[in-house]
Amino acid sequence: MSAKKRVLVLCTGNSCRSQMAEGWLRHDLGDRVDAVSAGNYPCFVHPLAVRVMAEVGVDLTGHRSKSVSEFVGQPFDLVITVCGSAGETCPVFPGSCKMIQEPIPDPGTFIGAAEESVQRFREVRDLIRQRIVPLVAGHLLVP
């Protein structure tokens, strides 16, 4: 059996979108893909990201927010940036691997009532699974 393909998911703060993408990739493709996430300005793993992923059986409690600098020099088969709006600062990862920009809205910037915030995180959680998992599978796992 061949080695797992390595995927790095990048975002600005490594608190919501990239953490959820890492969780989904490990959950859905973990037997074939080694997924990690990082950001330019790591801060914390958002509690609502942990909460909504737990609702669907994906545990992020052991995750930590990581700097992209921790992964410089490591080989990756695919790097995906999930920063949403043009005004966000997305990390740049040096290297010769394939890079893809797949914008995902940032649920952490939503301002509203508590239950509305949770719903926004759920929507983004589901969007990430619908877009990122097939994207990775299509780029790395198709013979």
Image (cartoon, rainbow, N blue to C red):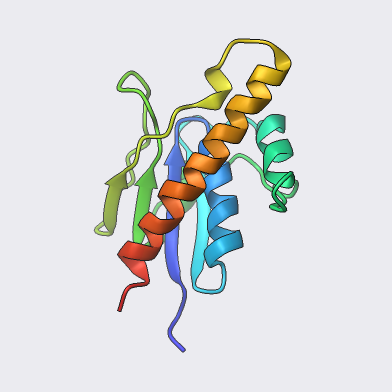
Q: Is residue 97 visible?
A: yes
At a point 55% along the width and 51% down the height, the residue shown is 22
At a point 61% along the width and 39% down the height, the residue shown is 65
Between 24 and 37, the residue placed more toward the observer is 24
From what the image shows, is residue 104 above or below residue 85?
below
Between 117 and 40, the residue placed more toward the observer is 117
From what the image shows, is residue 121 above or below residue 7?
above
* Image coords of residue 14 (percent x, y): 54, 36
Q: Is residue 75 visible?
A: no
Q: Is 43 left or right of 58, judged from the image as shown?
A: left
Query: Where on the picture, by quarter, is residue 125?
Result: top right
* Image coords of residue 96 (percent x, y): 24, 58
From what the image shows, is residue 73 above or below residue 85?
below
At a point 72% along the width and 51% down the height, the residue shown is 59
* Image coords of residue 112 (percent x, y): 63, 10
The C terminus: image quadrant: bottom left
Residue placed farthest to the bottom in the image? 1
